[in-house]
Amino acid sequence: MYNTGMEESVYKGVLTVSGKAAFLAAADGARHLEGEKIWSGYKRHWTGLPVSARRLPQKDYETGRPIIIMWPDAPAVPEPFVDLYFNERLVKYPASFLGHMAVNVNGDIFNFSHKINENEVISREEYFYRPALGEFAPHPETCRDNIDDPERPYYDKFGRLFMRTVHVLRLTGLDTATLSRFFYRELDVIRNTPPDPKRPGEYVDFSALTRNCATIIRDGFRKLGFDKIRGILPRDLFVNVTYHFLKQSENPSIKVSCQTYQQLRVEEAMPSAMPPLINPVNRWKNRILSKS
């Protein structure tokens, strides 16, 4: 399995903070997760709001107890659907200069990366709302990723919506079964490739120009027959796909919508930034889209 979650009870209630204590106040009067460590980012943004929560298999380094993940309630999206996520760049990481892409197929979010441990398929709540605790947090001294201690790694990969602003293209009417199979096969290829001996923990066949988070997703769309979709860099591909389905597609069964999820600011992350468009054609397409 690729999903990092586990079977665990989901608790629902209003996030309530009383002094140093925090818990979910349920409609029946129960106080769920009282005594557990609730991340400060959740308390900052969601105190007084209804949320869901569960325990993760990963442990908090300070308490040794399972990490609590929390997320706001949202209506389920009718299947089949595909969400294309363009994540703005992380300003403290040079490798993030061109941003990042991921794709959600019927609730399974596929993430591809040069780091082996970031090639995964996870739930929406884990992708967007992991807390900056335990292995998900940045190192407390460097404020970056640090895996020098294999017993206490800091991957700095908590909820993407706390780290970046995310731009979303939603598509319905695609062959999601074929698309999902394609991405699972790509994950199998990556997971079964021996790691780079010179760069432990990194995917040896990763290439910034030929095999990256954007090109794998692009090839998934081409597998569905969308040969006109082009791009090798995250923002360029996002603009290209958006332009194709909004301006060029003649298939009336494919429905398209766009929205932006603004970054939820927390102390563990700086504001994200929009990377440049590299291809002049996509700059022109983006100007056309901005006037729509």
Image (cartoon, rainbow, N blue to C red):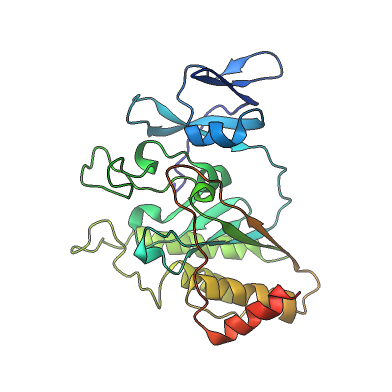
Q: Indicate whether 252 appears above or below 76.
A: below
Q: Indicate whether 128 appears above or below 219.
A: above
Q: Quadrant of residue 104?
A: bottom right
Counting from the top left corner in percent of width and height, residue 115 is at 34, 58
Q: Indicate whether 191 appears above or below 61.
A: below
The residue positioned 70% from the left and 75% from the top of the image is 289
Residue sitting nearer the eye, 241 or 44: 44
The residue positioned 57% from the left and 57% from the top of the image is 166
**Residue 202 relative to residue 254: left or right:** left
Counting from the top left corner in percent of width and height, residue 67 is at 43, 31
The residue positioned 67% from the left and 31% from the top of the image is 49
Q: Quadrant of residue 119?
A: bottom left
Counting from the top left corner in percent of width and height, residue 201 is at 27, 56
Farthest residue, direction top: 29
* Quadrant of the frame with the C terminus: bottom right
Counting from the top left corner in percent of width and height, residue 182 is at 52, 65
**Residue 113 relative to residue 86: left or right:** left
Q: Indicate whether 109 appears above or below 179.
A: above
Farthest residue, direction right: 252
| Residue 223 visible somewhere in the drawing | no
